Amino acid sequence: MKKKIRGKLEKIKMLILDVDGVMTDGRIIMDSDGREIKNFYVRDGHGLVMLQRHGIRVAILTGRTSSVVDHRARELKIAQVYQGALNKKEVYAKILEKNGLAPEETAYLGDDIVDIPVLKMAGFSAAVADAVDEVKKHVDYVTLCRGGKGAVREICEMLLEALGFWPEVARRYDFDGPE
């Protein structure tokens, strides 16, 4: 991990995530009754659980509104869910205020141009591998994994490692840790 990125990650106290294209692969499936279905990647969810277990807060910030997101957030014990955020920059400021955080204490993972204002403000900004090119120009890091296919987990592991929690994770799951 590059020294500059590690330095930013070491300050993080909260990870904020977009949903569609980040926590999911970006597809929205609707059945014949208009019920929405989203695909979430189980390893991403476990990464979020591990973060929270080590005191790193997680919030969801999305422009859409979906009961599926509320359900997934409850499963993952993510209490801070901000849906229907048409102006993500304003909601981000409210998240900072509510949590008593400075921008440099937050990480944000996004994929589309609506995320750029928050990506520019967050202490650590990342885009998923399949984010639009304009977003990739404004981030500290582009994940190797695509949205909904391990990108969230990748960021979670980077945070756990930079914050010094990875050896504890390795002990808990009985493996040697990174090579």
Image (cartoon, helix red, strand yellow):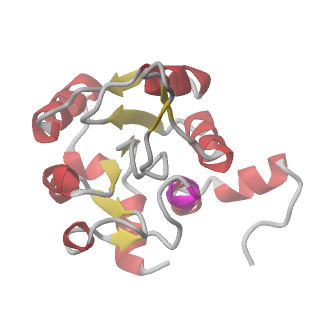
Give yes or no for residue 154 being in the magenta stretch: yes
Q: Residue at x 59, y 48 (%)?
A: 44
Residue 161, picture quadrant: bottom right
Q: Give 16 or 161, whichever is nearer the viewer.
A: 16
Give yes or no for residue 60 being in the magenta stretch: no
Residue 118 on image: x %, y %: 19, 49
Residue 151 on image: x %, y %: 51, 59
| 1 relative position to 175: left or right | left
Residue 8, picture quadrant: bottom left
In the current view of this chain or complex, which residue is farthest to the front? 32
| 65 relative position to 153: left or right | left
Q: Residue at x 21, y 47 (%)?
A: 103
Q: Residue at x 52, y 62 (%)?
A: 162
Q: Give 98 or 116, whichever is nearer the viewer.
A: 116
Q: Give 4 or 107, whichever is nearer the viewer.
A: 107
Above or below, 102 against 31 in this view is below
The magenta stretch is 149-155
Q: Please, what is the dominant secondary structure of the magenta stretch?
A: helix
Looking at the rendered image, the quarter that the C terminus falls into is bottom right
Above or below, 127 against 68 in this view is below
